[in-house]
Image (spheres, rainbow, N blue to C red):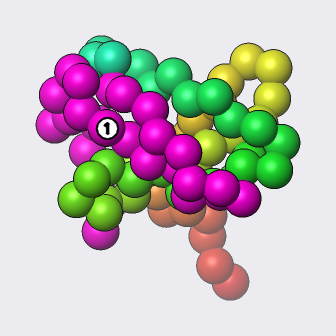
Amino acid sequence: AFGDLAKMKIGQKILVLGATISSSVFEGNGDVNLSVTKTSGGGLVLNLDGEALGIALFGDTTSFAPISTITDALKSVQTP
């Protein structure tokens, strides 16, 4: 199931399932500050209800791709 960042409350835990399992705390306003290592890049980001919030990214500028961005991108792809 897909989670909704708008329904998250400040202080709720977020889990990253990458090469290891790590956790972070939601800071509000859609901000998800994750410490993502190269080996955890591409890991699934979940709330404690097991709903997918996005994917952890490894890079210089951002460390999170929200599930809404991913689903919107997949809807825009046309199949032959």
Residue 16 part of the magenta segment: yes
Q: Is residue 31 at least partly visible in the picture?
A: yes
Which residues make up the magenta segment? Answer: 1-26
Q: Which amino acid type corresponds to the residue marked 1 in the rendered image?
A: Lys
**Could you tell me which residue is drawn at 31 percent across and 49 percent down?**
47
Number of labels in the image equals 1
Q: Nearer the viewer, residue 5 or 24?
A: 24
Q: Badge 1 is on which residue?
A: 13
Tell me if residue 54 can be seen.
no
**60 or 16, nearer to the observer:** 16
Furthest-bottom residue in view? 80
Q: Is residue 27 above or below residue 47?
A: above
Residue 26 pos. (x, y %): 33, 26
Q: Secondary structure at mark 1?
A: strand
Residue 3 rendering spot, x and y as whole percentages: 28, 52
Q: Nearer the viewer, residue 70 or 36?
A: 36
In the image, residue 2 lies in the stretch drawn in magenta = yes
Residue 34: x percent and y percent?
56, 29
Q: Position of residue 6 (x, y in %)?
A: 21, 32
At x 22% / y 59%, what residue is drawn? 49
Q: Quadrant of the N terminus?
A: bottom left
Question: From the image, which quarter does the C terminus lie in?
Answer: bottom right
Compared across the picture, whether 50 is left or right of 17 comes to left
Near mark 1 (Cα within 10 A), the count class, few <14, some 14-19 or many ≥20, is some
Query: Residue 64 falls in which quadrant of the image?
Result: top right
Residue at image x 27%, y 53%? 48
2 to 60, vertically: above or below: below
